[in-house]
Amino acid sequence: MENNYSYAEFLKAVGKNSSSLQAEKLLNDIYMDLFLNHIHRQQTMERLMGLIDLSLDSRDEQAFLKYTESLKKLEEAN
C-alpha cells in the first residue's frame, strides 16, 4: 500500500503514454492510495488512543507506555 509517487514520475508516465485515459487512471490510483493511507492512519490513531484510555483505566503502566510510544511514532511519521 505504500507507494511513493512524485510529480516527475507522473509527468514521465503521462508523456510516455500521451493518453488522457492512462494519465487519468494513474492520477486516480495516486489519489486512491493517498486516501486509503490517510484513512488507515486515522483509524490506527483512534485505536491506539482507545487502548491508551483502557490502559489508564486499568492502571497498566506497561501497556500505557507501549501504546503511547506507538502513537508517538505514528505522529512523527507524518
Image: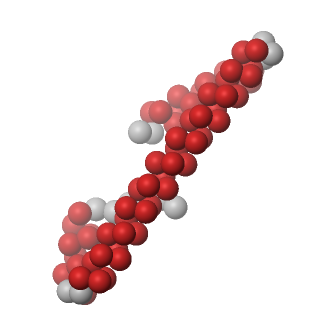
Displayed quadrant of residue 69: top right
Residue 5: x percent and y percent? 34, 63
Question: Going 31% across and 82% down the picture, which residue do you hit?
Answer: 22
In the rendered structure, the answer to whether residue 34 lies left or right of residue 7 reads right
Displayed quadrant of residue 11: bottom left
Q: Is residue 52 visible?
A: yes
In the rendered structure, the answer to whether residue 76 lies left or right of residue 16 reads right
| Observer-nearest of 51 and 66 | 51
Question: Going 47% across and 33% down the picture, which residue do you hit?
Answer: 75
In the rendered structure, the answer to whether residue 71 lies left or right of residue 33 reads right
Colour pattern of the rendering: secondary structure
Question: Going 26% across and 70% down the picture, which residue do you hit?
Answer: 10
In this picture, is 32 found above or below 44?
below
Give the number of marks. Answer: 0
In the rendered structure, the answer to whether residue 49 lies left or right of residue 36 reads right
Residue 31: x percent and y percent? 37, 61
Q: Is residue 61 visible?
A: no
Question: Going 67% across and 28% down the picture, which residue do you hit?
Answer: 50
In this picture, is 47 found above or below 61?
below
Residue 78: x percent and y percent? 41, 39
Displayed quadrant of residue 49: top right
Residue 42: x percent and y percent? 52, 41
